[in-house]
């Protein structure tokens, strides 16, 4: 299955869990070995591979233990400018702004 914007969250979680399990098995590692390498509890690994649910810390620890953490860079691409360049420009967004409501001026001829 390909993960894309049309995938449900449930489908995405299941696919990620299946991919991680397949990768672990391709390295001939048991869940217990992955637990020892990653520092993630065996129960958390079993739960993730079964349901796809895990904390971000757990997922990142598993990816790191399997030498896959570098692939996470593709999840949220960096902007074209690095942070130093943004700072030099004096413009680094801190938060999104709310859209302003369109206000209409009463002209007195509405009925």
Image (cartoon, rainbow, N blue to C red):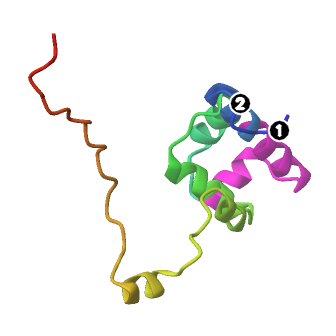
Q: Which residues are magenta?
A: 17-38
Q: Residue furthest left?
A: 108
**In the image, is 40 to the left or to the right of 12?**
left
As drawn, 33 above or below 111: below
The residue where tag 2 is placed is 7
Is label 2 in contact with label 1 (beta carbons under 8 Å)?
A: yes
Give SS at disc 2: loop
x, y percentage for residue 1? 85, 34
Give the residue at mark 1: 2
Is residue 66 shown left or right of residue 98? right
Majority secondary structure of the magenta segment? helix
Q: Kindly indicate the quadrant of the structure image that contains residue 109.
A: top left
Question: Does the magenta segment cover residue 26?
Answer: yes
| SS type, badge 1 | loop
The image position of residue 6, as x and y in percent, is: 71, 30
Residue at the image point whose x is 81% and y is 50% from the top: 24
């Amino acid at each position: 299955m390909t993960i894309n914007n049309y995938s449900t969250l449930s489908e995405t979680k299941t696919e990620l869990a299946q991919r991680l399990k397949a990768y672990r098995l391709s390295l001939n590692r048991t869940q217990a070995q992955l637990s020892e390498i990653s520092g993630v509890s065996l129960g958390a690994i079993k739960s993730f591979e079964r349901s796809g649910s895990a904390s971000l810390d757990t997922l990142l620890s598993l990816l790191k233990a399997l030498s896959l953490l570098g692939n996470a860079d593709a999840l949220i691409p960096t902007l074209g400018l690095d942070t130093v360049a943004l700072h030099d420009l004096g413009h680094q967004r801190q938060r999104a702004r709310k859209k302003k409501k369109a206000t209409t001026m009463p002209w007195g001829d509405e009925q």
